Image (cartoon, rainbow, N blue to C red):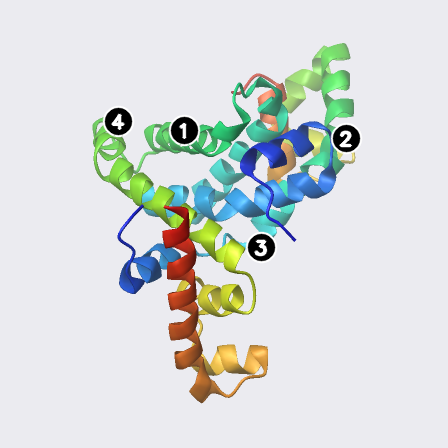
Amino acid sequence: MATRTDAQLVSRCRAGDPDAWNELVERFSRYVYAICVHAFRLDSTDAEDVFQDVFARVYERLDRLRDDDAVRPWIAQLTRRLCIDRLRESKRESPAEAEELETAEADETLARLDEALAVRAGLEAVGDPCRDILDRFFARDESYRTIGEALGLPSGTIASRISRCLAKLRVELEGRS
Amino acid sequence: MTGYDEERIASALRLLPPAPEAWVQAAQELPLARTAIESIVARAEADAAFRARLVADLEAALEEAGCDATPSVLASLRLHLGGG
């Protein structure tokens, strides 16, 4: 099945398609989570609050998005702003420290996360079994043994499969750039 | 992004671990909770005392209204009540 573009997904969400909303949350959940915990280093409680706040706002305000193709930067900015608000409210960080995070380290991480999201889009296009194997190994940090057991494959073959799948993903990404 | 090499791809994949499943599920259930949220917002608009209780203690007021105070419902209600 062809992957829907971000704009197509937004359009379906606006039309009230519940499957599209599930897909939108699935597509951006890792991104929002990573901004909260990697870029802004929120603790789990604050990260969960921001995560839910982001998707509540996206759900309520999708009609206000002027360019459906711009949903990713819109979500990124929303998450960034809510993370900064949370840091400013927190006793753990002084406002000056929050500002410093905002302007330097966090933005650098955000740029890397944008790149990571593009790689994930390539991974989705490559599909299973490579998507599953690479996701389990790199993103979920599962061992060869765990992956082998989950997929019914000899663990001794996992390393070579990962290597082949990385090469396949590389071809996919180079075809997109 | 150009100039892909496999180490760079691997690093990118490591940067996006899955969000906790329960968080994702709660966000996906927002459309299902919408009826309950709209009903609570309507009551808050019509009943100043209920609105005051909501603002003072959202979770307790939701329990009183018989609604599960999930993180996604709380976030959505804060938005409706002018918290963002």
> Nearer the viewer's eye, disc 3 or disc 4?
3
Chain letter of disc 2 in the image: B
Q: Residue tagged by mark 1?
A: A77
Tag 4, which secondary structure?
Answer: helix
- Between A56 and A87, the one lying in front of the other is A56
Q: At label 2, which amino acid type do we have?
A: Ala
Q: Residue at x 52, y 55 (%)?
A: A124
* Whole-number angstrom distance, CA of label 4 to CA of label 2: 37 Å
Chain letter of disc 1 in the image: A
Q: Is residue A33 visible?
A: yes
- Between A138 and A161, the one lying in front of the other is A161
**Above or below: residue A143 compared with residue B44:** below
Percent x, y of residue A140: 45, 64
* Whole-number angstrom distance, CA of label 1 to CA of label 3: 23 Å
Q: Specify whether B2 is left or right of A150.
A: left
Q: Dot 3: few (<14), some (14–19), or many (≥20) neighbours within 10 Å? A: few
Q: Residue tagged by mark 3?
A: B21
Percent x, y of residue A57: 56, 27
- Between A68 and B38, the one lying in front of the other is A68
Same chain for mark 4 and mark 2? The answer is no
> Nearer the viewer's eye, disc 2 or disc 3?
3
Chain letter of disc 4 in the image: A
Q: Dot 1: few (<14), some (14–19), or many (≥20) neighbours within 10 Å? A: some
Q: Specify whether A107 is left or right of B68.
A: left
Q: Residue tagged by mark 2?
A: B36
